[in-house]
Image (cartoon, grey):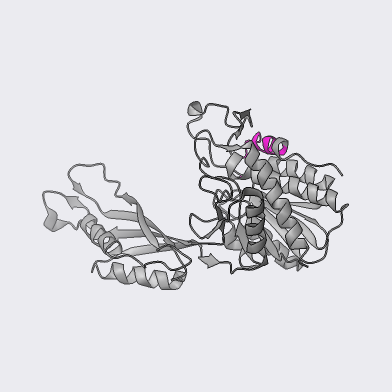
């Protein structure tokens, strides 16, 4: 069986300009490599009214439990100021021992590493599996995440197909490979506040009602006290006001409306319902009328210690000499959807340059990550 090189596959994936949503070219590259290894690949596209169509890939080898799945995404964020890059953003160039390009860290190289690790494992076992291996790869993680992983999980559920363990290849390490495994994530709640006023001339305020001071009162109440102090597994929940918008271009008109948007990254001290109740109570304390729209893009979750986290931690220590922290810090990922089906943890490359100009990762780290992933596969499939 042909052994797949993680570096060249990383380069092939980076050279696809798959800014969200990936139209499928990156997934086609993966499918070709996985089919060589004997995987059955299913490419599916989902679309909802008002959203962009998103291509996804599910590939599986084997038909028995446990089904150990690797999850990731081939879509990437825009390159930003392309002129400021020292290399072409989609070149996949290797320079100074680093692989450069959009998606190098987040997270095309991790996908390539798991494919390569799978090929090495299958070579050592003569293609025999004590269980199943699968890939769930979406083109929609960096975007709305509506037509990606969630839809594939629904598709699997409709087929009666189950994932038993899942490893997500997000770049979890702040500075050096082996520092951190993500075993949970904070939830994310968005709110848009609208305060209505009565438009009028600034010289006649008694004939109008200015919504801006009312909005300021509400925002002051939201930020008056910390939401919580955190706990042993999670840092404190945090609310950030991210936008205030009035849209008033005149210098002598009291506006009729003022809006603000905020985001809360919340720990497991709250459910979405209890957090909404707490925030509503704070806003109501301002004593002014308002409207609010809520949107929860992910709930907080924690994967309890078990075979998966143990296998990843042991493999990381074996190949890096570091015992990784089991962390719940950072943003969200598609693990927030997968946790409803099976235990899920995240481990990938160093994320110091993800989403930045000149995104890059060390070539040696990709090789080491491949070795880590191979050890994890061996551990999980030997625990049947």
Q: Nearer the viewer, residue 256 or 231?
A: 231
The N terminus, quarter of image: top right
Residue 6 point in image, percent of width and height = 72, 40
**Does residue 303 appear left or right of residue 380 in this picture?**
left
**Does residue 201 appear left or right of residue 274 in this picture?**
left
**Does residue 17 appear left or right of residue 236 in this picture?**
right
Q: Residue at x 35, y 66 (%)?
A: 227
Q: Is residue 320 above or below residue 81?
A: below
Q: Nearer the viewer, residue 267 or 231?
A: 231
Q: Nearer the viewer, residue 251 or 288?
A: 288
Residue 146, quarter of picture: bottom right
Q: Is residue 15 magenta?
A: yes
Q: Is residue 123 at all visible to an observer of this figure?
A: yes
Residue 284 point in image, percent of width and height = 28, 70
The C terminus, quarter of image: bottom right
Q: Is residue 33 magenta?
A: no
Q: Nearer the viewer, residue 209 or 82?
A: 82
Q: Residue at x 53, y 26 (%)?
A: 86
Q: Is residue 197 at all visible to an observer of this figure?
A: no
Q: Is residue 297 above or below residue 120?
A: below
In this picture, which residue range is highlighted in magenta?
9-21
Q: Residue at x 53, y 66 (%)?
A: 301
Residue 175 point in image, percent of width and height = 51, 45
Furthest residue toward front: 321
Residue 152 point in image, percent of width and height = 68, 58
Q: Is residue 292 above or below residue 178?
A: below
Q: Residue at x 64, y 63 (%)?
A: 310
Number of residue marks: 0
């Amino acid at each position: 069986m042909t052994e797949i090189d993680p570096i060249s596959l990383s380069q092939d994936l980076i050279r696809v300009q798959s800014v969200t949503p990936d139209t499928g070219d990156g997934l086609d590259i993966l499918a070709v490599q996985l089919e060589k290894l004997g995987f059955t690949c299913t490419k599916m596209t989902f679309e909802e009214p008002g959203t962009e169509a998103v291509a996804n890939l599910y590939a599986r080898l084997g038909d028995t439990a446990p089904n150990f799945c690797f999850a990731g995404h081939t879509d990437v964020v825009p390159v930003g100021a392309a002129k400021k890059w020292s290399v072409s953003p989609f070149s996949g160039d290797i320079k100074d021992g680093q692989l450069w390009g959009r998606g190098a860290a987040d997270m095309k190289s991790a996908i390539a590493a798991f494919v390569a690790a799978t090929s090495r494992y299958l070579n050592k076992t003569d293609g025999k599996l004590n269980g199943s291996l699968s890939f769930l790869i979406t083109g929609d993680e960096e975007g709305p995440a509506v037509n990606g992983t969630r839809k594939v999980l629904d598709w699997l559920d409709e087929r009666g197909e189950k994932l038993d363990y899942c490893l997500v290849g997000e770049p979890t390490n702040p500075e050096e490979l082996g520092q951190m495994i993500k075993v949970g994530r904070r939830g994310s709640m968005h709110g848009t506040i609208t305060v209505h006023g009565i438009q009028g001339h600034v010289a006649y305020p008694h004939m109008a009602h200015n919504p801006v001071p009312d909005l300021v009162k509400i925002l002051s109440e939201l930020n008056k006290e910390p939401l919580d102090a955190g706990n042993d597994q999670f840092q404190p929940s945090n609310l950030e006001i991210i936008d205030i918008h009035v849209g008033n271009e005149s210098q002598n008109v009291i506006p009729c409306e003022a809006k603000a948007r905020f985001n809360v990254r919340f720990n497991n001290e709250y459910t979405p319902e209890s957090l909404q109740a707490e925030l509503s109570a704070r806003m109501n304390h301002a004593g002014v009328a308002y409207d609010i729209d809520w949107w929860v893009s992910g709930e907080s979750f924690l994967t309890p210690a078990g075979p998966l986290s143990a296998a990843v931690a042991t493999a990381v220590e074996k190949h890096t000499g570091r015992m990784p922290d089991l962390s719940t810090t950072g943003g969200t990922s598609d693990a927030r959807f997968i946790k409803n089906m099976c235990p899920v943890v995240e481990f990938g490359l160093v994320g110091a340059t993800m989403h930045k100009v000149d995104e890059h990762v060390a070539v040696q780290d990709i090789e080491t990550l491949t070795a880590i992933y191979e050890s994890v596969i061996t551990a999980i499939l030997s625990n049947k």
